[in-house]
Amino acid sequence: MARCPSCGAHRDEGDDYCPVCGETLTEVQLSEATEEPWYERPGTMLVLVLFFWPAALYGVHKTGQWTHPSNRWILGGCLLMAIVWVVLL
Ligand SMILES: [Zn+2]
């Protein structure tokens, strides 16, 4: 059972705010999201795929999750950009 960090009241895991004091309980998750490493940020990875796909591949290597569904679009994008490079160069 989770507790409200503000008033200590019991709350459900899925609650967005404390039913007792109204404290917002999603801020912790948001701050954790902003501290993600660059290779776990979809926006950063998208830019890398478009402008320098080898760096995006390195990012996937850093996650170590080559077969993870959320990384498939990166791998597909890198493959596509590799083909584009070969065609252009
Ligand atoms: Zn509370």
Image (cartoon, rainbow, N blue to C red):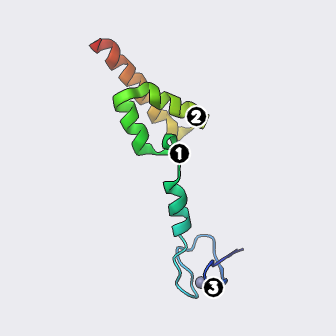
Image quadrant assignment for residue 84: top left
Q: Residue at x 29, y 11 (%)?
A: 89
Left or right position of 86 against 64: left
Q: Residue at x 45, y 33 (%)?
A: 74
Circles 2 and 1 in contact, beta carbons < 8 Å: yes
Q: Pointer 1: what residue?
A: 37
Question: Between 75 and 53, which is closer to the camera in this rendering?
Answer: 53
Q: Pointer 2: what residue?
A: 62
Q: Earlier in the sequence, mark 2 or mark 3?
A: 3
Whether disc 3's CB lies below 8 Å from ligand 1 is answered: yes
**SS for dot 2:** helix
Q: Residue at x 52, y 84 (%)?
A: 22
Q: CA distance from mark 2 to mark 1?
A: 10 Å
Kind of residue at disc 2: Lys
Q: CA distance from mark 2 to mark 3?
A: 39 Å
Number of numbered discs visible in the structure rendering: 3
Q: Quadrant of the N terminus?
A: bottom right
Name the quarter showing ligand 1: bottom right
Q: CA distance from mark 3 to mark 1?
A: 32 Å
